[in-house]
Amino acid sequence: MSRWVGAAGHEVEAVRLNGRSLLRVSQYGYVVAYCRSVAEVAGYVDLGDLVEVVTLPARDRRPSI
């Protein structure tokens, strides 16, 4: 799932809850709100501060020959 982090410990995650796609807004690990749209998220977080967290695949650490 997608995840964005911002200033002041904010985190926004795309989640599925009761069969619905929502955006979960949390701050310092505590859920602040579940939002149906980006416009709703903007009421809690400055969207310009958000950066997407990208998980890269693990690198093969075996020595090359």
Image: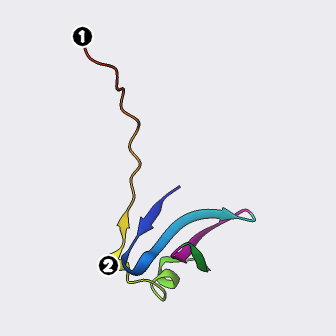
User: To which quarter of the image does residue 45 belong?
Assistant: bottom left
The residue carrying pointer 2 sits among few (fewer than 14), some (14 to 19) or many (20 or more) residues within 10 Å by Cα, namely few
Say which quarter of the image contains residue 7: bottom left
- For the stretch drawn in magenta, what is the main secondary structure? strand
The residue at 54%/76% (across/down) is: 25
Mark seen at residue 65: 1
- Name the secondary structure under disc 2: helix
Q: Position of residue 48 (x, y in %)?
A: 31, 78
Residue 35 at least partly seen? no
Assign the C terminus to one quadrant of the image. Answer: top left
- Give the extent of the magenta segment: 19-28
State the residue lying farthest toward the top: 65
Q: Amino acid at mark 2?
A: Gly
For disc 2, the marked residue is 48
**40 left or right of 8?**
right
Q: Is residue 53 left or right of residue 41?
A: left
